[in-house]
Image: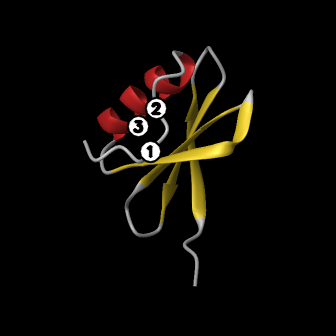
Amino acid sequence: MGSELSFVNVTGTGCLIYRETSGRYIVSHKEKPCQRLQAATLAGAYAACKGLEQGQLDRPVVA
């Protein structure tokens, strides 16, 4: 069973942030839609966005 996603925000650079019903945040980027990262907090989701934009992240964020 998967969790439903609720849209939270899109950054000016195209990073999309969603929240699962479980409370986790899911991050993806318009230019890399197949790459999704998890974050425990909204601050962690924004950090994941920054990492995606810089091409530095390839695993879930635990912040």
Determine the CA span between mark 2 and mark 3: 12 Å
* Cβ atoms under marks 3 and 1 closer than 8 Å: no
- Of helix, strand and loop, which one carries label 3? helix
Q: Which residue is mark 2?
A: 57
Q: Earlier in the sequence, mark 2 or mark 3?
A: 3
| Label number found at residue 45 | 3
Q: Position of residue 41 (x, y in %)?
A: 30, 45
Looking at the picture, which amino acid does disc 2 mark? Answer: Leu
Determine the CA span between mark 1 and mark 2: 6 Å
Q: Quadrant of the N terminus?
A: bottom right
Q: Quadrant of the C terminus?
A: top left
Q: Is residue 2 above or below residue 57?
A: below
* Cβ atoms under marks 1 and 2 closer than 8 Å: yes
Residue placed most toward the observer, 44 or 35 = 35
| Label number found at residue 59 | 1
Q: Earlier in the sequence, mark 3 or mark 1?
A: 3
Density class for disc 1 (Cα within 10 Å; few <14, some 14-19, many ≥20) is few
Q: Position of residue 50 (x, y in %)?
A: 45, 20
Between marks 2 and 3 in the image, the one whose residue lies nearer the viewer: 2
Q: Is residue 27 left or right of residue 23?
A: right
